[in-house]
Every structure is written in C-alpha cells, then in structure tokens.
Image: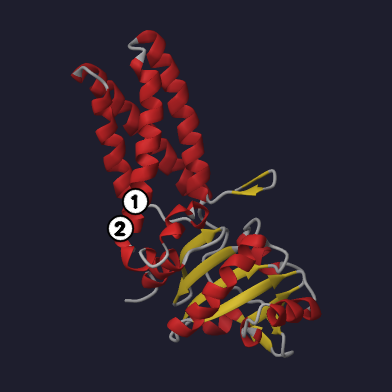
Amino acid sequence: MVIGPFLLPPMVFASLIGLILLMLIGSLLKRRVDPRFDSWVGVVAVMAFIGARLGFVFRHWETYQLEPLRILYIWQGGFELSWAIVAAVLSIFFLKTWQHRAIAGVTLAVVGSIILLIFSQISKPAAESLPNISLETLNNETINLSDYTNDNVVINIWASWCGPCRREMPMLEQAVKDYPDIKFYFVNQGESDQVVNNYLQNESLEMQDLVLLDPTQSIPQFYETLGTPVTLFFSKNQLKAQHVGEISAELLSDRIKLLKP
C-alpha cells in the first residue's frame, strides 16, 4: 500500500487503520464510560507493538544477539502476532473494574477482527503463480520464470536507486549461498544493463547471473504490486508469501521455511 512517498506493508497499513479506529472508540468511551479509556488506548498500542517485536526477536535471538542494534530496525518487519494479542489482552488490566475490562475486551476483539479483515483484502497479489514472462539476464540470456514451476523460487523486485533495496542486497546475496536449493531471481525495474552492472560492480555484488532486466515493469504489473522492494516466495508454482519493503535475514528465513515440506 502506497501513501504519498511511503510504501507500507499490508499489515502495517491495516494496523494503522485499526489504531485510528481504536482511538475513536477510546475517545467515545472516555466521554461515555470512564476517562481512563483515553489513556488505555495508548497503553494497548505500545504494549502490542513492543510485545510483537520482542516475540520475533526472542525467536531469532541467536542472530540478533550478534548485532543487538538491529532489534531497532523495525522497518525490516519482524513481528509476532500471537505476542501482540497477548500483550493487548494484558493491557485491559490497566482499567480498574471488570465491567470496564469487559468493554475493553470487546473493543479489542472488534478492532482486531477489522485489522485482519483489511489485511486479508489487500495482502493478496492479483496472481498467485509464476508468470509466463521472458526476461533477459545481464549476460543476454533469456529466462522464462514459468519454466521453474516445479522449484522453490524467490523473486525480488528491486531498483538500484531504491534505498531499502540497496540495504538488503548484501544480505540477499548471502542468502543465495545459504539456500542453494532455492532459485533466487532479482528483477530490476526499468534500468539499463549498464546502470545495473555499474551498481553491482561498485557494491562488489556477484549476482550478475541472477539479475533479470524488466524494462517495462511487467512483473509488478502482473502481480499488481506497488513500489520496491517486493519479495515473492513460490513453491511448486504457488505463491506462499510476499513481503513489501526491506526484509531482514530472519524474516527471509521464516518465509523460506514455508517453501519446504
């Protein structure tokens, strides 16, 4: 979901809508029931956010402990829904009476259901299979992605001018080595082979054989995705997951696990 210059992952967009709705309900309950409901909205938002992030970090502590600062890289994604739900439920004890806690519980159930409904409506691409589209590599070879319907495939839609794309590229290059049974393709959007080659050489990235040139942006048109980067995960010609925006090594690992039996 694109809002102005911002590319928002579907769950982030749905959560922001949910937060706005929660604030409106909290304002109404503040006037009609108890002034503490206004403060409770802030409490539940903070607790759910921190809980979701900590849940993901704890599950991947083995890698995060090596670079603790990356815990703060929330723009890469990485949140545990179950931890967010638990934290949100615990927030109702901020309210004093069981009657008010019950009202808060119903409010959370309604807002949570709306968030999931919005997410389900905007998170699916227009297509869920590999496209019958031929693209050229930097070595002037032609590759049709539909030839890999029996494989596990990761498609990363990117551009060299895109900051988040540039940040995640070294990690993705390492992922190619870490997951030799996965076919990775990096579909560049609208740039010439000279521009792409210069970028790869300047950044010392050895990915020339895996970069596909998409001068007409046919891949994002096929899936109706917006912005870059976008990463799509396929198993046996079925889309299993997608990630909008910069992706972390931990989240990439989680998504790749979905491709394996």
Judge from the rendering whether residue 34 lies leftward or rightward of residue 189; answer left or right.
left
Which residue is more in the foreground, 205 or 113? 205
The residue indicated by pointer 2 is 58
How far apart, in angstroms, are the residues tagged by discs 2 and 1? 6 Å
Residue that appears at 35% across and 56% down: 56
**Mark 2 touching mark 1, by CB under 8 A?**
yes
Query: Which coloring applies here?
Result: secondary structure
Residue type at tag 1: Leu
Tell me, for residue 148, which label it has, or none: none
Q: Compared to 200, does 157 lie above or below? A: above
The residue indicated by pointer 1 is 54
Residue 97, image x and y in percent? Answer: 21, 17
* Image quarter of residue 137: bottom right
Which residue is more in the foreground, 86 or 53? 53
Provide the secondary structure element on which disc 2 rests.
Answer: helix
Q: Compared to 78, does 108 lie above or below? A: above
Can residue 249 be spotted in the picture? yes
Q: Compared to 87, does 200 lie above or below? A: below
Residue type at tag 2: Phe
Residue that appears at 23% across and 27% down: 93
Judge from the rendering whether residue 226 lies leftward or rightward of residue 236; answer left or right.
right
Residue 225, image x and y in percent? Answer: 62, 58
Judge from the rendering whether residue 7 lies leftward or rightward of residue 29; answer left or right.
right
